[in-house]
Image: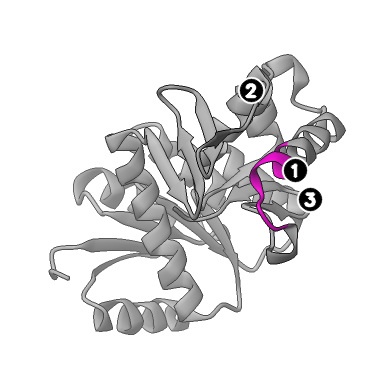
Amino acid sequence: MSITHRILVVDDEQQIQLFLKVALEAVGYQVLQAENGAQAVRFAASMAPEAVILDLGLPDRDGKDVLADIRAFSAVPIIVLSARDQEAEKIAALDLGADDYIEKPFGIGELLARLRAAKRHVEQRIQEIKVVEIDDLHIDLSLRRVARSGEEIHLTPKEFGLLELLVNHAGRVLTHRQILAAVWGPAHTDDTQYLRVFVGQLRGKIDSDPAKGSLIRTEPGIGYRFSEI
């Protein structure tokens, strides 16, 4: 990995900054450091980082406001890193455009894996996913066709829309509200029970062996995440 790969770390805790700087530089990243929201937005705009690791508890502004400001001009992958463990905080950050959310304390291995996944999401969005192969499951988004071992799986339009959304954001948590708004429209953002029914139906059609776990992972109280592809 080239040293030109920049990661912006936004955190006012010196120990966290030092820990992340050492860990990220050890795998080849160049680390930009910001201690407050104003610096974070300025560096995100001027230094073109490849990803942002953002703490929510900043001294000058709430991290969610910083997230919203960066999202207004950049699609850079953003991983929220915070001691705030309330579901409402996670949901709010994800709804504002965070690619993932990790609670403190955290393991560096997990953070690096989430970072790699978030960067892949952006690359996939740029390339536009069209065909996905997972074991014997074949998903062709352009032809709107799903098959297992050559045998077509019938999906309703809503089921396919749900699958398409999840596949296009594979590995990323999507909140209930994000999914409902995208597939059913803004008037249905509170119909979480309705969504659970459709996810259950979709799992029943695309999962070859439920005992091995579903391709659609539940993030309790938050939403769903499709397996990495």
Question: Which kind of residue does numbered mark 1 sit on?
Answer: Gly
Which element type, helix, strand or loop, lies under badge 2? helix
Image coordinates for residue 163, horizontal then vertical, percent: 59, 34
Image height of 23 relative to 64, above or below? below
Residue 208 part of the magenta segment: yes
Question: Which kind of residue does numbered mark 3 sit on?
Answer: Gly
Q: Which residues are magenta?
A: 202-209
Front position among marks 1 and 2: 1
> How dense is the environment of label 1, judged by Cα within 10 Å: few (below 14), some, or many (20 and up)?
few
Give the residue at mark 2.
183
Could you tell which of marks 1 and 3 lies nearer the N-terminus?
1
* Pointers 3 and 2 in contact (C-beta within 8 Å): no
| Residue 61 visible in the picture | no
Q: CA distance from mark 1 to mark 3?
A: 21 Å
The residue at the point 72 percent across, 48 percent down is 222
The residue at the point 56 percent across, 46 percent down is 64
Which element type, helix, strand or loop, lies under badge 1? helix
Question: Which kind of residue does numbered mark 2 sit on?
Answer: Val
Q: CA distance from mark 1 to mark 2?
A: 19 Å
Picture quadrant of residue 155: top right
Image height of 180 relative to 35, above or below? above
Give the residue at mark 1.
204
Report the colour scheme: one colour
* Pointers 1 and 3 in contact (C-beta within 8 Å): no
Front position among marks 1 and 3: 1
